[in-house]
Each structure stands twice: as structure tokens, then as C-alpha cells.
Image (spheres, rainbow, N blue to C red):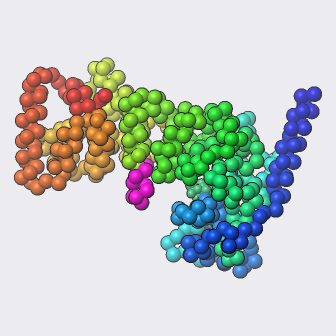
Amino acid sequence: MIKRLVQKVQTLLVRGLTARARRQPKRIPRSEHGIARERVSRAALRVCETLQKAGFEAYIVGGAVRDLLLGHAPKDFDVATDATPEQVKSHFRRAIIIGRRFRLVHVIIGGETIEVSTFRALNDADRPTDEHGRVLADNVFGTQAEDAARRDFTVNALYYDPVTETVLDYHDGVRDLRRKRLRIIGDPETRYREDPVRMLRAVRFAAKLGFEIDAATREPIRRLAPLIENVPAARLFDEMLKLLVSGHAVACITRLRAEGLHHGLLPLLDVILEQPQGERFVMLALSRTDERVRAGKHVAPGFLFATLLWHEVLKRWNERLAAGEHRIPALDAAIEDVLEAQMEKLAIQRRYTADMREIWMLQPRFERRQGKAPYKLLEHLRLRAGFDFLQLRCAAEEAPAELCEWWTQFLHGDAAERERLIAAASATGGARRRRRGRGCKTEVASSGAAT
Ligand code: ATP
Ligand code: MG
């Protein structure tokens, strides 16, 4: 009985998939979609023209089409084609095949890189999955309709032919875009089980585009949120980074919490966000990041993750200090603890963890304002990042504003000014020490570093 029911559901699902994969697209002419061809990158145009001249289909696809339709400047341009990677490569002077699981071609034209992918199949029944339904291999070529059906959201499944200036729309993406609605293609639960990262993507796109998540698309998220834990750590890191540097990180994190997705996603972040002080620091850091991204400035991932995990470092540092450990070794060990706990779920790349460690280790050094110490710090390669971090701590009222002002003057001052600042700091620092008459352990707390 149950077996038959399961079979029936499976048949229905497969039929649904097949129907999805056989759809005919709506063809939307220039007069309706309004995309100005001048806004398409010249390199992407060249790639499409070249492949089409060689007898293949080639379209601009995904985020670029969505952004063009919304009147935003696309971040990058992807092309989808029925040519195989080898065929694509043979038509361009500078092209490399990348990726092992699903091979793509990077075509480089005039300093721009265009990612060209061959239409992918749905290949439903035979795809290997884990016990939760997560697809483990997904590497068979297919038709354009299949390629459209395996994309995540309707607004991400639009194809633009820059030669004829036609948009091909298989899943009413243009309608959803006009209604500002994020809708997943196919059965939401199945699609999240296949790839739980799509839940994060739903939140990211909704926050970034200011779209509403369609009710059916939204419903399973809270329930399926724990599936995020099965996603390989490196993949999670990539998606998390996209979210944090989207220019809408505050909106994304707020929404992640609203959907119950922050638990276990950025391990430790859930804990931090639940403490008022930690939340304040993280939100301030994220809003500054958003400002930078929107102003077109570079954001260093190491700095960003250093801000996200700072309060966890502080907590462990304080615990070690309370146990009587020395200040600097205690900080070093606290950092080790935090990074280790973090790496299990979110594989922050080595080069970023090196930056994070340096930024954190620099913090107590800003408190040493006497003798040669400030001059030594000037030579530190990471001084700028460390100082930016200090500024953030001061803005969050975790470190005294006076410390920031002192360092701003010291960094910009001439030799005489620097001597004067050191003398002034020695005078007040000396007085403070005499009053307390205690060792260096209290200095951590007094400076506000260990709140
Ligand atoms: P962005 O502007 O943030 O880069 P994007 O839509 O281009 O947005 P990408 O991550 O670059 O997002 O992915 C490119 C396209 O690949 C998407 O538009 C979507 O069609 C498809 N895609 C990406 N990730 C998935 C996924 N997990 N499941 C299904 N389709 C996906
Ligand atoms: Mg993209």
C-alpha cells in the first residue's frame, strides 16, 4: 500500500519534471523587454555572435539578464550554449576549460572573462543523491528547456539572444520580475532537498532585489533549514561570501534570521547575534560593508569574517584571562579555538584566516602607546586593516573613542607631533597605572577590548 503510494508520488514527480523540461518558451521581443543592447558587455556579445556564426545556439543567461531587465548593471555575464566545452574552446584564442564535476569554459576577451556553460540536463531519475535528496553529481548535457528547468528561480532562468534581441522565458520569469516576486522552479521542497544552498540564495536574492518570496517558495524553508548542515563547507563559504558582499548584507542577515536560517549556518554567528552587544557590533560592521560595496570599493573577506567572529574571540579570550592566562598567549589561544570551531562547518580559506588572525592580534597592540611600540606598529603590513578594525570597535563603543583619535593623529602626524602624542599618552597611561597599581591583565578590560 505505502509502496504503491510512494511509486505514485514518484511517477507524478517525474512527470512533473518531464513536463517542465518539455516546455516551450515565451519569446519576448525588444519592444516588450526593453533591454538596450549597448548595455551588454562587448565580450559577451562577441561570444554569442561567434558561437551562433559557427552554427550553435548561444544566449546570455542568469543574473545578467535579470539585472538588465531590472535596469541594474550586471556584475558579470554568463553564456549558455548547446556547444560542448571543447567546441566552445576551439572558437576562441583565449579560452580555458575549468571545473571537474561540470566543465565550463572561461573565454577571455579584452580583459573580461565570460563563463560559457553547455546546457545541462535534468536527468532526474538517475542522478545520485544523498539520503536527504541532495544531488551529488550533475554533469550531463541537455536541451535548453532542461537547462531552464534546472535553474533555481524563474527570474534566473531567462535567456537573452543579443543578436536577435529576443528574451526566451520558460517559466514566466518576466512576469515574476515585474511583480517583484521570487519563485522557485518546480516543487520547492524537492528543489531545496536537491540543493539546500537554494534556501540561502532565495534569501540573498529577495534582500538584494527587494523582492517578496512567493508563499510556496518560502514555506518549506524554516522546516528544511537544518539541511544546510549537509552542504560541503567550501560551497557554503562561497555562498556566504556572495551574501556578505552583495551590498545588502544587513538585509540578508536580518532575513536569514527571520527565516530561521542563521542557526548552524555561520557557526557561532547565531550565538553572537543573540547577545545585544555582539549584534550591535556585527550589524555595524555589515552596514559599513554595504556602504563600501555600494560605493564600488573593495571589501576584504578576511576583515569581514574577523568582524563576524570578533565577539566569539572576545568571549573565549575573557574566559582564558579569568583562568589566569597571560594576555597575549590567551588571545592567541582564543583565536585558535574560534577558528577551529568555525572551520568544521564553514571552510574559511587559509589566506583569509591568516588575515583574521593578524587583525585580531593587532588589537591589543594599539593600546601600547609608549616608547617604541607605536613606531613598531607603523611598520606592520596589516596596520591599515587593524586600524580600520579598531575604528569599528570605537564606533560600536567597545573601545574608547580617545584611542581612535590618538591613533588617527599619530598616523597622520609628523615626527614632532608623534613625540608629543607619545609623551601625552605616557603621562596619562602612567597616572592610570599608578592609580590602579595592578598588572597588565586589567588593561584589557579597561581599554574596552574585553567586554
Ligand atoms: P549574481 O548577480 O548574484 O551573480 P546570479 O543569478 O548570476 O546572481 P550566480 O550564482 O552567478 O547567480 O549563478 C548564475 C546562474 O546559475 C543563476 O542565475 C541560476 O540560473 C543558476 N544557478 C546558480 N546556482 C544555482 C543553484 N544552486 N541551483 C540552480 N541554479 C543555480
Ligand atoms: Mg552571476
Of 268 and 95, nearer the camera is: 268
Give me the residue at 20% from left, 37% from top.
Answer: 367
Query: Considering only vertical position in the picture, is 74 above or below 433?
Result: below
Give me the residue at 53% from left, 35% from top.
Answer: 257
Residue range (magenta):
290-301
Q: Is residue 362 left or right of residue 376?
A: right
Coordinates of residue 91 in the picture (x, y in percent): 66, 76
Figure quadrant of residue 256: top right
Report ligand 2 position as a quadrant. Answer: bottom right
Query: Considering only vertical position in the picture, is 27 above or below 439?
Result: below
Coordinates of residue 113 in the picture (x, y in percent): 55, 68
Residue extending farthest to the top is 323
Coordinates of residue 84 in the picture (x, y in percent): 72, 67
Coordinates of residue 189 in the picture (x, y in percent): 73, 39
Judge whether residue 130 can be spotted in this image: no
Q: Quadrant of the C terminus?
A: top left
Query: Considering only vertical position in the picture, is 194 above or below 169?
Result: above
Of 214 and 226, nearer the camera is: 214
Q: Is residue 172 left or right of residue 236?
A: right
Magenta stretch contains residue 1: no
Q: Is residue 25 left or right of residue 88?
A: right
- How many numbered dots are placed on residues in this image? 0
Of 167 and 211, nearer the camera is: 211
Magenta stretch contains residue 292: yes
Give me the residue at 56% from left, 50% from top.
Answer: 210
Judge whether residue 440 can be spotted in this image: yes
Of 293 and 303, nearer the camera is: 293
